[in-house]
Amino acid sequence: MTIASPDSLRPTARRRDPSSRFAIFRIVPRSWTAALAALALLSAGCGGGGQYVWYSSLPRSEWSQPIEYTIAVGDVVNIRVYDQENISTRTKLRRDGRVEIPFVGEIQVAGKKPFDVAREIEGRLKAFIVSPRVTVNVEEAQAVSVTMLGEVGTRGTVSLPPPAELAQALAAAGGLTEFASESKIFVLRRAPSFMRIRFTYDAVLENKGGAAMFPLRPGDVVVVE
């Protein structure tokens, strides 16, 4: 007679077959219970916990990238005044979003487009220079911060160079874990109104409908269930 060992009687967690598209069982560590509960409350308070919209059904406004970049605090800008090297400068925006330029003084730059800043500087320089020509280029853009939660390799905040995309965020977080449901990848977006946007891993991997290149915005939360 064969006697079963004590270890063989203990319940074991069934591991998910990577080739399967269906999650079988999942064990949630106690340390994550509070975090998951908070996330559920966030979703429930913003339009219903189970509601979502497929990425392919989104209006094009959610996909569009700005035609021209808007300068942000922390960016490094190169301001060139034609034939006036003593006025030209390369500087990083201060926390108040301003920079200082010779003859011009301090100027608010954050929240404006490079073309508009160049025209404003030209207007101020006309008192000192005949027909000034100015170009403004962003040499180093501030990173886009996105929060990664759920079944990813590394949870937390990741910083991505703009334009930040969904595939970049997943890669930066170490990809999906073996327990991840490949059909339940969500982007939680708060503004202008709360949305829970659903993707599948295959769609991101194969860039179906541009899923891999879906543009993320500062403050977005990516959740892999």
Image: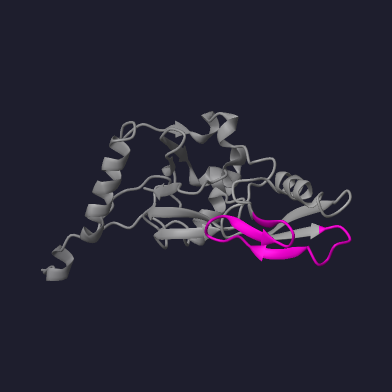
Range covered by the magenta-colored residues: 81-106
In screen coordinates, is 198 left or right of 108? Answer: left
Residue 49 x %, y %: 30, 35
State the colouring used for the structure image.
one colour
Residue 10 x %, y %: 15, 63
Give yes or no for residue 41 being in the magenta stretch. no
Query: Can residue 5 be spotted in the picture?
Result: no
Residue sitting at x 78%, y 63%: 87
Residue sitting at x 58%, y 46%: 212
Give yes or no for residue 94 being in the magenta stretch. yes
In screen coordinates, is 168 left or right of 89? Answer: left
Residue 47 x %, y %: 34, 31
Viewer-closest of 4 and 6: 6
In screen coordinates, is 104 left or right of 83? Answer: left
Query: Can residue 36 be spotted in the picture?
Result: yes
Viewer-closest of 127 and 114: 127
